[in-house]
Image: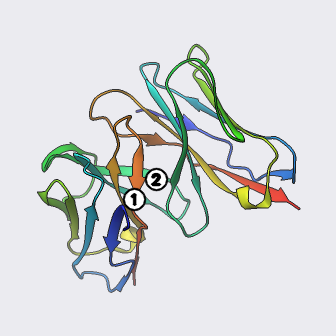
Amino acid sequence: QKEVEQNSGPLSVPEGAIASLNCTYSDRGSQSFFWYRQYSGKSPELIMFIYSNGDKEDGRFTAQLNKASQYVSLLIRDSQPSDSATYLCAVGDSGYSTLTFGKGTMLLVSP
Amino acid sequence: DTAVSQTPKYLVTQMGNDKSIKCEQNLGHDTMYWYKQDSKKFLKIMFSYNNKELIINETVPNRFSPKSPDKAHLNLHINSLELGDSAVYFCASGGAVGELFFGEGSRLTVL
């Protein structure tokens, strides 16, 4: 059984701070890693994906992957109140496999 | 144009009834999915179709029957609804790097 673990939070940060969201996964064969943002009552939307060890940056977002530690994280720089949402980590392998989601971390950014 | 669209967005029904949810995607993807998100916001895969063929069928009661008339459509029929079926059902299509594009969700309430 593949498992993806996230701290449910809420993680509270002040506006302008860096928010750090973490995720661990159980399947060493996992190849692809995704971060989704889900606002309350809305559908998940893709923020970033990462395949290789190291960092990947996109605007204010940085995804970090360490396959040896089976750990993936998402950093949000200059956090804004509009970033307040639940962040879902998802892990997949190759082919037609589905994504396994964590239960999400709620982020609250206070003005 | 909405990339992945689901109808209806809300269903309220009595136990024992049958209901259907329709999904259409205009992204040209070959793979489509049904996910269930329970009251604790946990997203869990139910079914995966690739070009109209069932690829993945997780442990889902056989009261749930997906149908894919073509690769752009994936419908979900649920027979003999139970209280525990109350959830938000998300349709998704799969992109080139394994990412998912979700529909807006269909919130099912069984009374």
Q: Position of residue A45 (x, y in %)?
A: 52, 54
Compared across the picture, whether A18 is left or right of B69 comes to right
Tag 2 or tag 1, which sits nearer the N-term? 1
Looking at the image, residue A70 lies above or below residue A68: below
Q: Split into 4 quadrants, where in the image is the N terminus of chain A? A: top left
Q: Position of residue A65 (x, y in %)?
A: 60, 23
Compared across the picture, whether B57 is left or right of B45 comes to left
Looking at the image, residue A17 lies above or below residue B17: above
Compared across the picture, whether B9 is left or right of A33 comes to left
Task: Classify 10 Å Cα crowding around label 2: few (below 14), some (14-19), many (20 and above).
Answer: many
Residue type, numbered disc 1 = Lys
Q: Residue at x 30, y 52 (%)?
A: B33
Q: Position of residue A73 (x, y in %)?
A: 66, 32
Discs 1 and 2 carry the same chain letter:
yes
The residue that disc 2 covers is: B43
The residue that disc 1 covers is: B36
Per the rendering, the mark at residue B78 is none
Q: Split into 4 quadrants, where in the image is the C terminus of chain A? A: bottom right
Q: Residue at x 40, y 84 (%)?
A: B111
Q: Residue at x 40, y 47 (%)?
A: B100
Q: Residue at x 73, y 50 (%)?
A: A9
**Residue B62 image-quadrant placement:** bottom left
Q: Position of residue A23 (x, y in %)?
A: 62, 34
**Residue B37 image-quadrant placement:** bottom left
Task: Classify 10 Å Cα crowding around label 1: few (below 14), some (14-19), many (20 and above).
Answer: many
Disc 1 to disc 2: CB gap under 8 Å: yes
Q: CA distance from mark 1 to mark 2?
A: 6 Å
